[in-house]
Structures are given as structure tokens and as C-alpha cells.
Image: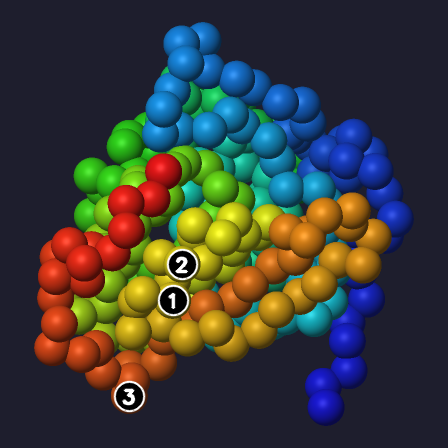
């Protein structure tokens, strides 16, 4: 059994870890106008990220995509700790602008190559997944209806360019888990429980695809047609 790696958040609070990285990612941001499909911004706690990576290892050569990345905390943390390049997808214009400001500040403070981190402002469900992207992170950024469409984009990309891939769900809602169980290309590979959490959703789930596992002949459209409507 592989020995667990230490939580390198080092017990620092969110504000202190932000200062170490030279960024600002704390707080909550609601949409100015009510959104039925897109949720408010809230960063994954650094403590949770530390516990995740004490138990789970990013695959070799990973390129991370954070959907609903907010101000970019997950991308900056993974780049700083593992030198993993990444892309953040954020629709909110204010959060997108703040993420770009964080990118400049991170580059000055950490003296790192910020070309390895990119931010895109667009609808996640309309975005085409790039063939170099292999790890996809979600902290409930949108409704399960949108998540289902994004997952179909991921599956299409994996069918076009065969490669291993992983989906990381933080605080996974049952509707997200249902969508994942309906997709035969992915299997639940690992669960990381957060014993300091207070709710049953306080965990990470890692869903994994390996190219040897082939998708059934049933199309995604057929699966969703017979699936109950999720909110």
C-alpha cells in the first residue's frame, strides 16, 4: 500500500495560503442576476485539497481542467505543488477578470511560468474538450443538466483521441453521481473522505477512464432519453 503523503497545506488557513501563492481566492460570489443552471462561486478549501492529494496522485503528464474555476485556486495550487499545467473555464465576467489578475500576481510572487495556466470565459457546455486535457475538476459549478452536456463533450473527445482520463468531483451531489453512473466510459476508482466535514457530501470522488474499457453501443442521446429529468 502506498504511504499517504502529508497535507502540504501545512495547516495554513485559506487567507494565509493565498498570501503564500500571491493570489486572492477567498469569499463567495453570487450572480448579479439569478441563474437557474449556474451556481455561485465558492473555492475548494485548501485543507480539502491537501487531504485529496495526500490520498490521491495526479496521473503522469496530466493537464487539469477546472470547470467553474472561479478565481483559479485549484489551478494555482496544483501548478505550485505539482507543476501541472491547467485551464480554468469560468463564465462569470467578474470572476474571470479576477482570475486573470491572480495569474499575473502568481507569476510575480512565485516566479513561475504562467503560460502553463490559462483561463477561458465561455459556456462550459459549448466548449470543445482539447485532446491534451486529461483531468477534469468539478465543485458543483452548474446544474446536473449542464454537467451532463459537459460530460458528453468529454466522452466525445475521448472517443476521438483515445487516452486515459479522470474526473474529480468535490462535494458530489447525488444528481452528479447519477450522471456519472450512467456513463459506461467511467468507473468510480477512489473516494477520499473528509473526516473533518459535517455533511455526507464532504468527500472527493475520482472517476476514471482507461482506453481498454470500451463504451457500449448505446448512444449518449439514447441514455439521456430514457433517464429521468434532473434539475
How many angstroms separate mark 1 from mark 3 (CA)? 18 Å
Q: Position of residue 45 (x, y in %)?
A: 70, 42
Task: Indicate the secondary structure of the residue bearing disc 2.
Answer: helix
Residue sitting nearer the eye, 22 or 33:
33
In the displayed image of the protein, which residue is found farthest to the right? Answer: 11
* Relative horizontal placement of residue 65, taking residue 160 as reference (left or right): right
Q: Which mark is residue 194?
A: none
Considering only order in the chain, which callout, 2 or 3, is on the residue closer to the N terminus? 2
Q: Which sits earlier in the primary sequence, circle 1 or circle 3?
A: 1
Q: Which residue is mark 3?
A: 212
Residue at left offset 49%, top offset 53%: 174
Residue at screen point 56% across, 19% down: 29
Q: Which residue is mark 2?
A: 178
Q: How many marks?
A: 3
Q: Residues within 10 Å of mark 3 (few under 14, many from 20)?
A: few
**Gap between marks 3 and 2 measured at Cα:** 23 Å
> Quick check: 177 above or below 96?
below
Quadrant for the C terminus, please: top left
Mark 2 closeness class: few <14, some 14–19, many ≥20 residues within 10 Å: some
Q: Mark 3 or mark 2, which is nearer to you? A: 2
Say if residue 64 shows up in the picture.
Answer: no
Q: Are marks 1 and 2 in contact (CB under 8 Å)?
A: yes
Check disc 3 and report its element: helix, strand or loop: loop
Label 1 residue SS: helix
Res. 144 image quadrant:
top left
Between marks 1 and 2, how big is the CA–CA gap? 5 Å
Is residue 25 shown to the viewer in this render? Answer: yes
Amino acid at each position: 500500500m502506498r504511504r499517504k503523503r502529508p497535507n502540504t497545506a501545512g495547516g495554513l488557513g485559506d487567507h494565509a495560503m493565498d498570501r503564500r501563492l500571491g493570489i486572492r481566492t477567498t469569499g463567495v460570489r453570487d450572480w448579479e442576476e439569478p441563474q437557474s443552471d449556474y451556481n455561485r462561486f465558492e473555492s475548494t478549501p485548501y485543507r480539502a485539497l491537501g487531504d485529496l492529494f495526500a490520498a490521491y496522485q495526479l496521473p503522469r503528464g496530466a493537464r487539469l481542467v477546472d470547470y467553474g474555476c472561479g478565481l483559479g485556486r485549484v489551478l494555482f495550487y496544483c501548478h505550485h505543488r505539482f507543476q501541472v499545467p491547467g485551464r480554468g473555464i469560468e463564465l462569470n465576467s467578474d470572476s474571470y477578470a479576477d482570475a486573470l489578475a491572480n495569474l499575473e500576481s502568481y507569476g510575480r510572487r512565485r516566479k513561475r511560468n504562467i503560460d502553463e495556466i490559462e483561463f477561458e470565459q465561455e459556456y462550459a457546455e459549448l466548449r470543445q474538450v482539447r485532446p491534451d486535457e486529461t483531468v477534469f475538476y468539478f465543485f458543483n459549478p452548474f446544474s446536473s443538466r449542464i454537467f451532463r452536456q459537459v460530460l458528453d463533450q468529454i466522452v466525445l473527445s475521448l472517443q476521438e483521441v483515445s487516452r486515459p482520463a479522470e474526473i474529480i468531483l468535490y462535494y458530489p451531489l447525488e444528481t452528479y453521481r447519477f450522471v456519472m453512473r450512467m456513463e459506461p466510459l467511467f468507473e468510480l476508482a477512489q473516494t477520499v473522505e473528509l473526516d473533518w466535514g459535517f455533511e455526507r457530501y464532504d468527500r472527493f470522488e475520482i472517476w476514471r477512464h482507461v482506453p481498454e474499457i470500451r463504451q457500449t453501443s448505446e448512444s449518449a442521446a439514447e441514455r439521456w432519453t430514457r433517464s429521468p429529468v434532473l434539475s
